[in-house]
Image (tube, rainbow, N blue to C red):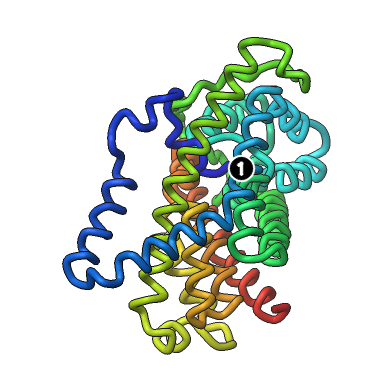
Amino acid sequence: MTDLSASLRPIGSAWAKLDKVLLTGIAIVLIQFAFDRTAVPATLVEMLDHFWGTLPFILFAVAAIAVMKASGSERLLDGAFHGREGRMIFLGALVGGLSPFCSCQVIPFIAALLAAGAPLSAVMAFWLASPLMDPAMFAITAGGISPEFAIGKTVAAVLLGLTGGLTVKLMANTALFVDPLKAQPSVGGCCSAKKLTLNWRFWQEADRRQIFGSAAWDNLVFLGKWLLFAYLLQALLIRYVPADLIATVIGGDGIGPVVLAALVGAPAYLNGYAAVPLISGLLEQGMSPGAAMAFVIAGGVSCIPAAVAVWALVKPRVFAAYIGFALLGAILAGLAWGAYA
């Protein structure tokens, strides 16, 4: 579950009105022009250069999402939540990162699973892993930071899901996890929960071709605007924030920078895709690799779209456990990645 599709609109309507991301970007450029106008051309050139370098990965991500939507391959995820509980936990964590659901779609999906008797442990494994990685996120992360970082984040996502799921299984009868659901969870959403039957030859049907085109265009607009905005912030970060300051606060070895990055990950996390250029810029300025990993793990799991999907269905104590898993997992992932890198 990522926040990629959360802002999708019908085809052609993405430009019908100026959204907050575009307006904020324009405002930032105007402010820079007012105070440092000679630096504006260099900032814009650097932004476009980085965007151009990431464009092949963006196009791959867009195509992958469109194929998932048009082919109905989302249905393949349903099989992960049947069978023995241990198997469900493993598959829930493994396929969580492949989920094409947007944050509003996952609410009815998870509500239906829980209503059908899927254990909370398997659902928790899916919940923890799914905001962190999917094919689109992997492509953007590999292009924006490095393939090794993308692989490391994928491994961390699966391990976090497994750890959370197994912990819930072991503590299922404790006061923390007994009777976890709200009495009347909201299962509505801004997106349709309808899923197509599986057909990999989607181009043979007019409706599926339309779905492919709509999904491709809307995701291209969404990714494009967020990444342009993020590369603008990256350029400003490199230009105006002293590298020594970054290196002092979240650089170096040890647990301190990792814990700090995990704690600030949630409030500072704008968007999973926008975070990639920002982390790349911070790494250039001296951020430690471990702190970078902790930031993206904690921020991804606890960001608003992911957290709202959990809050909508479970009681506050279970939600608190979800956030606790995110922070502890982020710190451990950061320390492990710091030692590896």
Q: Position of residue 335 (x, y in %)?
A: 64, 77
Q: Nearer the viewer, residue 278 or 300?
A: 278
As helix, strand or loop, the secondary structure at mark 1 comes to: helix
Residue type marked 1: Leu
Q: Position of residue 261 (x, y in %)?
A: 48, 72
Q: Identify which residue is drawn at 82% across, 33% down.
A: 83
Q: Determine if residue 200 is in view.
A: yes
**Which residue in the rendered view is the most extreme toward the left?**
34
Q: Position of residue 297 (x, y in %)?
A: 57, 61
Q: Which of 329 and 223 is in front in this view?
A: 223
Residue picked out by circle 1 = 59
Residue 66 location, quadrant: top right
Q: Identify which residue is drawn at 44% across, 47% down.
A: 316
Quadrant position of the C terminus in the picture? bottom right
Q: How many marks?
A: 1
Classify 87 as above or below 35.
Answer: above
Is the residue marked by circle 1 packed among few (<14), some (14-19), or many (20+) residues within 10 Å? some
Q: Position of residue 149 (x, y in %)?
A: 67, 66
Q: Determine if residue 184 is in view.
A: no
Classify 153 as above or below 114.
Answer: below
Quadrant position of the N terminus in the picture? top right
Residue 143 location, quadrant: bottom right
**Which residue in the rendered view is the most extreme toward the top?**
206
- Left or right position of 101 against 92: left
Q: Identify which residue is drawn at 50% across, 36% down.
A: 5
